[in-house]
Amino acid sequence: MTSRFTKPFTAAPEHIDELGHVNNSVWVQWIQNLATAHWDAVADPAHREQFFWVVIRHEIDYRGNIAAGETAQGETWIPDAPRGAKSVRHVEFTDQSGKRLVSAQTTWAMLDRATGRLARVRPEVLARFQN
């Protein structure tokens, strides 16, 4: 079973582009903010002190959008076992009616804080995310 994490995001005027909705670059920021919030909320404190994550790939599908003042519910989860230093995270944003707006798969690499080098993701690091 996968532990899912949710967080709302409200579009502010500075998030809106010339088309009148949230700019794609803001969705990328929200994806990263959601993943970071999930790590901060769930990870073992010792693991947060020892490791950090960097994005190495985003694959994003844009299916809808929201305007200023509207809120999207972000949800993220890690469905599969890691591969070496990499872990794939899934993300979905839905509007207030439940319509999917944005979905993504992002690949993150875990680094050791002390060395700045890639660190193999051990099962115990992701255990709290996949219970």
Image (cartoon, rainbow, N blue to C red):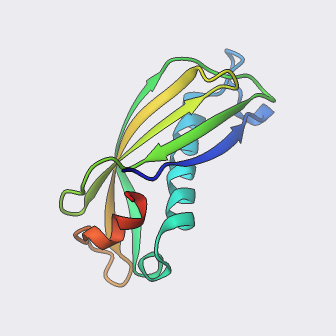
In-image side of 1 versus 10 (left or right): left
In-image side of 65 versus 14 (left or right): left
Q: Quadrant of the C terminus?
A: bottom left
* Number of on-image labels: 0
Q: Residue at coordinates 57% horizontally, 51% vertically from top-left?
A: 33
Asked if 129 appears above or below 68 in the picture, the reply is below
Pick the front one: 35 or 26: 35
Asked if 42 appears above or below 10 in the picture, the reply is below
Rendered image quadrant of residue 99 = top right
Q: Picture coordinates of residue 78 (x, y %)? A: 37, 50
Q: Residue at coordinates 48% horizontally, 45% vertically from top-left?
A: 76
In-image side of 21 versus 3 (left or right): right
Residue extending farthest to the left is 84
Asked if 129 appears above or below 27 in the picture, the reply is below
Q: Picture coordinates of residue 113 (x, y %)? A: 39, 79
Pick the front one: 81 or 58: 81
Q: Residue at coordinates 59% horizontally, 46% vertically from top-left?
A: 6
In-image side of 126 versus 102 (left or right): left
Asked if 108 appears above or below 41 in the picture, the reply is above
Q: Residue at coordinates 32% horizontally, 65% vertically from top-left?
A: 110
Q: Picture coordinates of residue 54 (x, y %)? A: 39, 59
Q: Picture coordinates of residue 31 (x, y %)? A: 52, 43
